[in-house]
Image (cartoon, rainbow, N blue to C red):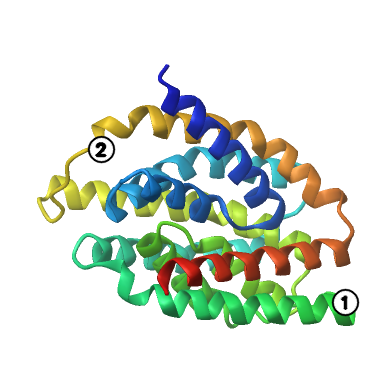
Amino acid sequence: MTPDFWLFAAVGFAAQLVDGALGMAYGVVSTTVLLSVGVSPANASASVHAAKVFTGAASGLSHLFYRNIDWRLLRLLTLGGVVGGVFGAYVLTSVSGDAIKPYVVAWLALMGLVILWRAWKGTRPRVFSWRSPLPLGLAGGFFDAVGGGGWGPVVTSTLLGAGADPRKAIGTTNAAELFVAAATSAAFLGSLLTGHWQTAGLRGLLWSLAGLIIGGVAAAPIAGWMTKVLPHRLLTWIVGLVVVALAGWQAIVLF
């Protein structure tokens, strides 16, 4: 095992602990670290989505055990997310994803402020409208594939901004991410095999990928428990602060 394995195992553990408990940040954190060491955006996104297949399975099982999943919401988010993720992978292997990142940052900032407002007002969860999760999943899957992370920030933050129960929103978003990551990974593989995507350097990321997977899987059960026991208002505050912090950091990097 190389030093990269232990570094990315620690990154994967910390990222999944936040992602599994708050419904966001695994892809953003992991992709940011990969990009910081010189990995190309397409390679970083492909690697992170491959890792998400394993971490998503572990996280989904954890949330299933703690009854944090809304099944109807799961079906609608998954359907939209799979279509959006496949299309996003195609776009990322064709053009640069940097052009749409400012729009994602603006969306994150807006949703973070809405969530913080709801936490401040102490707004109680309400029944979420079932007419919009499908296009929400479509948008989340697309931005997740193009940006290497964005499923949780887009989907979870929007659900919470609309007044969904934080535990159900977080648990369901994490469970749906397994299917979205699998579809997106298959799209990247298809692009590579058909010659649509010519890339080099993926072989050198194998130990980093293994670290992300093992660290993330180890953190998943702890994260599911944290979602179950944290108070509703505290959880909403934490999610809002994380979203605003992520948006602020991305804005600094971009501008």
Q: Quadrant of the N terminus?
A: top left
Residue 126 appears in the picture as rendered: no
The quadrant holding residue 193 is: top left
- Measured along the vertical axis of the image, is residue 178 above or below residue 131? above
Q: Nearer the viewer, residue 67 or 242?
A: 242
User: What is the CA distance from the residue labelled 2 to the residue labelled 1?
Assistant: 46 Å
Left or right relative to 26: residue 31:
left
Residue 239 percent coordinates (x, y): 72, 64
Residue 49 percent coordinates (x, y): 41, 48
Pointer 2 with pointer 1, Cβ within 8 A: no
Q: Secondary structure at mark 1?
A: loop
Residue 100 percent coordinates (x, y): 36, 76
The number of callouts visible is 2
Instruction: Give the residue pinned by disc 1.
Output: 124
Identify the amino acid type marked 1. Arg
For disc 2, the neighbor class at 10 Å (few under 14, some 14 to 19, many from 20) is some
Residue at 49% of width from left, 69% of height from top?
Answer: 252
* Residue 202's disc number: 2
Identify the amino acid type marked 2. Leu
For disc 1, the neighbor class at 10 Å (few under 14, some 14 to 19, many from 20) is few
Kindly give the residue lying farthest to the top in the view shown: 1
Q: Secondary structure at mark 2?
A: loop
Left or right relative to 227: residue 112:
left
Callout in the foreground (2, 1): 2
Q: Earlier in the sequence, mark 2 or mark 1?
A: 1
Residue 7 appears in the picture as rendered: yes
Residue 85 percent coordinates (x, y): 38, 62
Residue at 80% of width from left, 80% of height from top?
Answer: 118
Left or right relative to 241: residue 41:
left
